[in-house]
Image: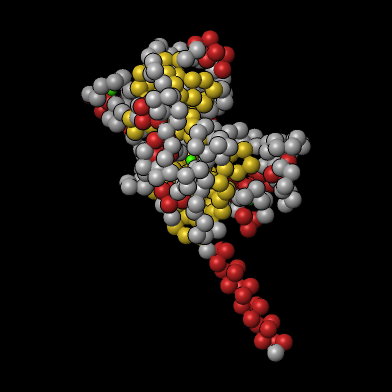
Amino acid sequence: MKNLFFVMALMCFVLIGTMQAEAAQVTHSEFQAVDETGEHTYNATDEVTLEGILLHNPAEMLDPTPDDTITQTYNLSAQWQFFFQGEGDDHAGTAVFIAQRYDNLPWVDTGGYSNGEFVAELNRINAAQFAPGDRIRVTGYYLSYKGKDNINEQHNKNSDHDFTIELVEKGVGIPRPELVTLDDLKNESDNFVFHESRLFGCEYYQSRLIKIKDVNFVDAAATMENWKPNGEFLVTDGTKTFPVKLGRGNGIYAGSNNLTEPFDVIGILDQESSNMTDGYRLYVMNYDGNGSVLASTEHRRADKPGDLDLNGIVNEDDVLKLLEDWLK
Ligand SMILES: [Ca+2]
Ligand SMILES: [Ca+2]
Ligand SMILES: [Ca+2]
């Protein structure tokens, strides 16, 4: 009797273990589903596997430089994050996140990474040698955070909470940014358009590469001040406004704003707000100094297939550019 109880307990333990270890392959749309408050509803499995196209270099978003001397509450020290977006009918995208000092969060009791451990962790994750435009597969635990369902370690440094990144296909190409107007993202009162169906409005474009044409700075002086890594400012189409958040790409620094108004913006529609029906913003990871489009070179290339020298027309010069690149 005692033995039978032991066997049954063991079987239950194994079964629970198996259930928790199993990761379902889901679409970004399934994974990002929300209710009317904007909170995420996916809970069918503890871990998920998602496929999509990497949109940018992670280090252009958050600073992954480790510093394990930081002890300030809520300061996670090194952070590493990227967006990858679904393909075809899977009109959604997801962020992947890891940080160093989880233990600076008051509720975390599983510790944080030393500098050496964090570097080893990034080496493990980067072993697949993926780059923007690659099709990747990410498997891991997740947490809902301020309007997005993120794949992460649930702030747990134990290796059973590792996520993995596999390279499915190299060089598929960054998807062409979808052309969106501020009328798609804001209502008549200049409030964010939110709908739990995620079939239109800001949710429809969340974590995806979009382009907004012909905008001006709302406040040129304030923009000059906030134009720096991680800076924020507003742009306007003349009626409605939208927040832009700069990344930390090497073309973003005080004095590098040479844009002529009106200009176009290409970025990733992000959300980060305790009220999960607002707090959207356009995240621009890098700026290449071209003067007319606030975007990185890779995102401008994705916007103009064939125009390899990015001069606005597709002609024999682009073929020469292709040959030049090819002969390198
Ligand atoms: Ca959301
Ligand atoms: Ca880990
Ligand atoms: Ca050209």
Residue drawn at x 40%, y 28% is: 187
Residue drawn at x 50%, y 43% is: 37
Quarter of the image for the C terminus: give it. top left
Residue 235 sits above or below residue 303 on the image: above
Residue drawn at x 66%, y 87% is: 4
**Residue 15: in sight, yes or no?**
yes
Query: Looking at the image, which residue sits at the far bottom?
Result: 1
State left or right for residue 95 relative to residue 86.
Answer: right
Residue 288 sits above or below residue 276 on the image: above
State left or right for residue 158 relative to residue 142.
Answer: right
Query: Looking at the image, which residue sits at the far top?
Result: 221
State left or right for residue 175 relative to residue 23.
Answer: left
Residue 50 image position (x, y, % from top left): 45, 52
Residue 203 image position (x, y, % from top left): 43, 39
**How did the renderer colour the structure?**
secondary structure
Residue 70 sits above or below residue 157 on the image: above
Query: Looking at the image, which residue sits at the far front?
Result: 189
Quarter of the image for the N terminus: give it. bottom right
Residue drawn at x 47%, y 60% is: 24
Residue 222 image position (x, y, % from top left): 55, 13
Front one among 281 and 69 = 281
Front one among 325 and 89 = 89
Front one among 205 and 197 = 197
**Residue 328: in sight, yes or no?**
no
Residue 253 image position (x, y, % from top left): 55, 18
Q: How many marks?
A: 0
Quadrant for residue 53, please give it.
Answer: top left
